[in-house]
Amino acid sequence: MTKTVDQYNFKGKRALVRVDFNVPLDENYSVTDDTRIRASIPTINKILHDGGSAVLMSHLGRPKGGPEDKYSLRHIVKCFSELLGRNVKFGNDCIGEEAKLLASALKPGEVLLLENLRFYKEEEKGDEEFSKKLSGLGNVYVNDAFGTAHRAHASTTIVAKFFPQDKLFGFLMAGEIESIHKVLHEAKKPLTAIIGGAKVSSKIPIIEFLLDKTDNLIIGGGMAYTFAKAMGGKIGKSLVEDEFLKTAQQIILKAEEKKVNLFLPSDTVISDDFNNNARRDICKMEAVPDGWIGMDIGPMTREKYAGIIGNSKTILWNGPMGVFEMSNFEEGTKAVALAVAQATEGGAYSLIGGGDSVAAINKYGLGDKVSYVSTGGGAMLECLEGKVLPGVKAILE
């Protein structure tokens, strides 16, 4: 059975496509980052160019118990129509008579975007009856929403049951799965994993899994201060998870046992307050003065990390090195982004994933200078932990 859209002819077909249009909006409901919408265009164009039509379903935000205007997908229609280069129709509901009428009236080359799936609690519950109603809107199912593939929701998993012969991966899903497979199973050595972000707790499973795969493990971001304290360092008012100090110690020991080079920051940029204009200084990682906060990796660490990345053949990056949203504390994240781009130019394979890493690589205009930018933070992490995602499994079964 065909599994990807490139091997399927959509002529005369109405494709029910799960996309991930969970994009940020400003106070005027304008899309501020259209990465995920653009990522869906190749799959939609394949369907339309074949002579098919497309019914798109997505969630937006986390509405609580029913429709809320600020989470309506109608806010996306203008931006999406412009990116697609054709007018997109909008359905005020994702199930019911109106949705059925709009879907059945679609002509080849036309696109219908349904209202937010999460206006129904049945979506997140993976309700079978709700899934059946969704399935009636198309005669072939395409999942192109990698960002939600780790959730067994109605539209990402259960609905696939109703298309036993006609369920496919979109180009985005196929690309995501292939890029992760490359890192996990076809990585050229040395493989370097760069793990940052605020908390150790959210990264424990991925770090433990990577200790069996990676040659170099680079740690940065807020989580680095938990490691510093675990090793007896003074970290001032820096972010720390005291309940994970023992875990950090165990990770250091495991890395030694498995002969993985674990790199922790040696110096840090500190501030006397959590804001961009606060007083700044640089100190050793283990000697942050009382009342000061670690905000970024320091210049020595930046240089060391760039060198390790430059000598890598496969690179995985998840999580920033500091508070890169503030211009005075972005140098660490920027240095890593540039080093990854340079290594890629020199022939390394690089996979970037996780919301903040993606935001960083885009902020510095380097999205097209790395091998692959993943659209799914949580989904990518679960994949890299060796789990089979429900949304992937549903297509393969």
Image (cartoon, rainbow, N blue to C red):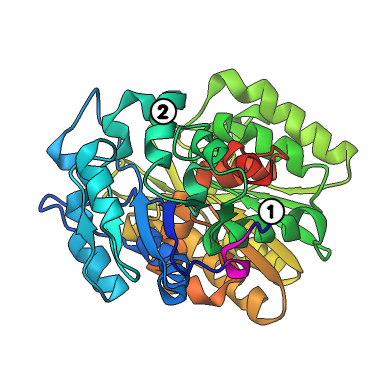
What is the chief secondary structure element of the magenta stretch? Answer: helix
Horizontally, residue 347 falls left or right of residue 85, namely right
| Residue type marked 2 | Glu
Magenta residue span:
4-8
Residue 282 appears in the rendering = no
* Residue depicted at x 84% and y 64%: 189
Q: Circle 2 — which element?
A: helix
Q: Residue placed farthest to the bottom in the image?
A: 346
Q: Nearer the viewer, residue 205 or 261?
A: 205
Q: Which mark is residue 193?
A: 1
Q: Is residue 5 magenta?
A: yes
Q: Residues within 10 Å of mark 2 (few under 14, many from 20)?
A: some
Q: Look at mark 2 in the image and give the residue it sits on.
A: 124
Q: Nearer the viewer, residue 17 or 139?
A: 139
Q: Are marks 2 and 1 in contact (CB under 8 Å)?
A: no
Quadrant into which the N terminus falls: bottom right
The numbered mark, 2 or 1, whose residue comes first in the sequence reads: 2
Q: Nearer the viewer, residue 370 or 332?
A: 370
User: Could you tell me how many numbered marks the image carries?
Assistant: 2
* Residue depicted at x 74% and y 35%: 208
